Amino acid sequence: MRLLVSDLTHRYDDLTVLDGIDLTLAEGEILAVIGPSGCGKSTLLGIAGGIVAPTSGSIRVEGEVPDGCLNPITFIFQDFALLPWRTVEDNIALVLEHHKLSAAERRERVDSGLRRMGLSEFRNALPKQLSGGMRQRVGIARALAVRPAMLLLDEPLSALDAQTRELLMDDFLELWRREKTTALYVTHNLDEALRLADRVCVLSRRPGRIRELVTIEVPRERRQEPSAQAHLAEVRGRLWHLMKAEAQMADREIARA
Amino acid sequence: MPDSLNPTVTPTASTAGQPVRFRGGGFTVKRHPWAALGAFAVLIGLWEGASRLGLASPLFLPPPSAVAHALAGMVTDGSLWLNLKASLARIAVGWVMGTAGGMLVGFAMGIFSTARAVGVPLVSAFFPIPKIALLPLFILWFGIGEPSKFATIGFGVFFPTVIATYSAIDQVPRNLIRMAQSFGLPWGSILRSIVLPGALPGILAGFRITASIALILVVAAEMIGAEYGIGAFVLMAGNLMQTDTLLAGVLVLSLLGLAIGTVLSQLERRLLNWR
């Protein structure tokens, strides 16, 4: 599924957070969006997922949806957004409840999500009993259960510690190796962008405008190899150069939101 | 102390340098399981002793033994059950009516902005009225019998339930609702699967408040006009100067409050084990 954003602007009252965003996500592409806090990254994602209404401009999707897809555009949240009163299994089943599915298929979708995220032995656990990493795995399993055509990831690893973040990045890589799901990945972490994305979109400080779109030339699977390091270091340097100035200036502004 | 700073001299643990003084004590809660029992025993002992020694008149402050005796008498002559039954029935009917109505209105106010805009000023206006003041009016409307008591208790329970319910709905994390919307859950499912369970802790906390309001109101209403009921029983004992029986009635009320509290705690533990 492709995503087409054109001349998108968003204001909260008199505060402009996104200004004239034009962006196209190709089929199967992973685009990381980075930028300083408050630059409207999450708002962009909310608009793309239809849970925030944009002030002006258009956001459209086109293209095919995989077989058995129940919710083409699906979120993975920073705070996991799990229901604390439901077990792991029931949290995943929640998003299937309003669909007409056979009992067998319902079970299959829940079980395969659990299996792929290594959660099978925790199926009856409550969220409070799980570590942050396992909670986010439940969030991923829940997203996989609806067989999405496009994933919207809102800083999915920000609430996790560094080691857990590494482990989950591997999980994402494995996920994108198997399913070529288009993804918009919002983060403020350069490592995540450099490991996972095909292209990186740098947003300016508020009001968020596109500063630059950087393509990472090395394919995802080869980025751990020594030969890739020179290119990655160069991209990192460029991204950091762009981000640093924006972040410094954003840091010195008085927060209003 | 140059020695202790010199890495070539290995200090022995017990002699070199200064010990670090422990300064992290206090400000923690320690459990004293027998303290509560002891406090009751001492209080009852002092009270009984004061009475036996003639320091307190048994007519105005009968000793615990006399109260226990009166309570035993209530059990054997059946007056305990007769009066308790009447009070419990009033609490049950009034509380259920007030709670059902209050939750309905509270949910409406929690979900619909219009209902809230209309409801909040009305609730704020009616909530502070001591509901027992309305009993005479309810007696005129419904007669001296049961309905006027149900109405007083129901009315008293209704407003705190409304407030507890809509505040509880405000406490439901919005991110969970947005999550459900992003997966396309219909409105009814969001209400049933997210808003209702998410509001449950606040609603149950409201039950604790309304249960004690119901207990206060049933006693007050029974003192104004009832043949049976713990409130009527206590009033009658007072009129007859039977202070031991009076205190036995008060003891029953205290145990009743304790029992209701225990039931609610159990309910919370069962329903909110996810917290």
Image (cartoon, coloured by chain):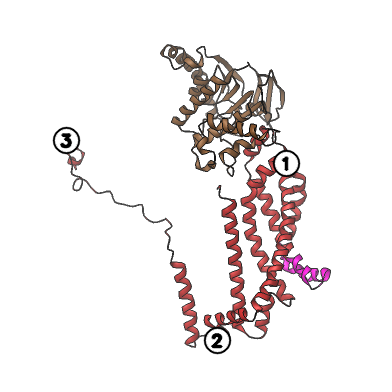
Residue type at mark 1: give it: Gly
Front residue of A40/A256: it is: A40
**In the depicted structure, whether residue B128 falls above or below residue B220:** above
Identify residue type, mark 3. Thr
Figure check: A142 above or below B79 = above
| Mark 1 touches mark 2? (CB < 8 Å) | no
Of B104 and A95, which appears nearest the observer?
A95
Q: Residue furthest left?
A: B9
Q: Residue furthest right?
A: B141
Q: Is residue A229 left or right of residue B172?
A: left
Chain represented in red: B
Which badge, 1 or 2, is on the more N-terminal residue? 2
Residue bearing mark 2: B58
> Which colour is chain A painted?
brown
Depicted B105 relative to depicted B183: above or below: below
* Picture quadrant of residue B68: bottom right
Helix, strand or loop under label 3:
loop
| Residue projecting furthest to the front | A104
**Chain hosting mark 2:** B
Residue A38 location (% of width, % of height): 58, 30
The local secondary structure at tag 1 comes to: helix
For the record, the magenta segment spans B128-152
